[in-house]
Image (spheres, helix red, strand yellow):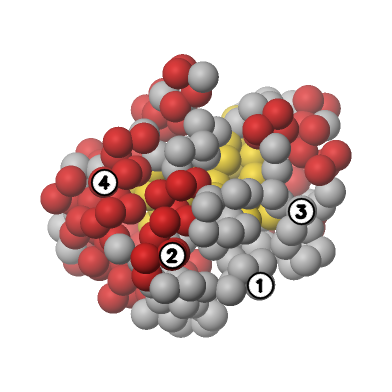
Amino acid sequence: MEILVDTHSHTIASGHAYATINEMIQSAKQKGLKLLCITDHAPKMPGGPDNVYFRNFKVIDKVVDGVEIFMGVELNILDFDGNVDLTNDVLSKLDGVIASFHTICIKPGTIEENTRAFLNVMDNPYVQIIGHPEDGKVPIDFEAVVKKAKETNTLIELNNSSLKPTSSRVNTRENAIKLLEVCKKEEAFITIGSDAHFTTSVGTHDFALNLIEEVKFPYELIINTDVEKFKEFMGRKRKNI
């Protein structure tokens, strides 16, 4: 199995990542990726870019050196009602939208509150991916989140960075196993994202792929092994807007 699309990456615009868009693209090309999603952090992340950054992606070529580019965002979930830090007017112009819970932007609540935040944010027609839900700092009801993801055509992310020994997230391996088992049972699609904050991590999914093999997760439920399959899925929610 080969991952052809990296669905989660950050540039210097995120404030705590360390490469330019072009440097990330060149790394993607060297890794053999066909499509790279640039998903810089939204404005409420300390050091993140302002609203105007996301409004001007029209100046960036759709294909650079043979690598297709999706310009998107990793939103911050701001409350348990699922509100986020960019308007739908801005989101409608982006190629890819991840929504994630970052403890620097919101203090985690109870399992019920955190789960409600994820369920509510998936009702947003522009949110296509739920980012790193395996983080034990933000406990959730995996079954409820996966069922809502399938119902709303939202992808569940298996985040490679979360599984690294250096990750600041907690209980990620155990939680990822539970999450994958629920996705397998519900036949819900996932995406594997590097969450790269530097060039060397672009297209690097080794920890996630090892876990996929360990739990015998079905390859056909991994959306970013096929560019066209990925692009078709990403457009599903927006067809109903």
**Residue neighbourhood size for the residue with mark 2, other residues' Cα within 10 Å, grouped as few (<14), some (14–19), many (≥20):** some
Residue under the image location 46 percent in, 47 percent down? 120
Q: Nearer the viewer, residue 91 or 200?
A: 91
What residue did someone put label 1 on?
Answer: 104
Question: What x and y, as percent, mark residue 184?
Answer: 18, 50
Question: What x and y, as percent, mark residue 137?
Answer: 46, 77
What residue did someone put label 3 on?
Answer: 43
Residue 27 visible in the displayed image = no
What residue did someone put label 4 on?
Answer: 147
What residue did someone put label 2 on?
Answer: 113
- Residue 220: quarter of image: top left
**Residue neighbourhood size for the residue with mark 1, other residues' Cα within 10 Å, grouped as few (<14), some (14–19), many (≥20):** few
Residue under the image location 32 percent in, 44 percent down? 148
Q: Secondary structure at mark 1?
A: loop
Q: Secondary structure at mark 2?
A: helix
Q: Amino acid at mark 3?
A: Pro
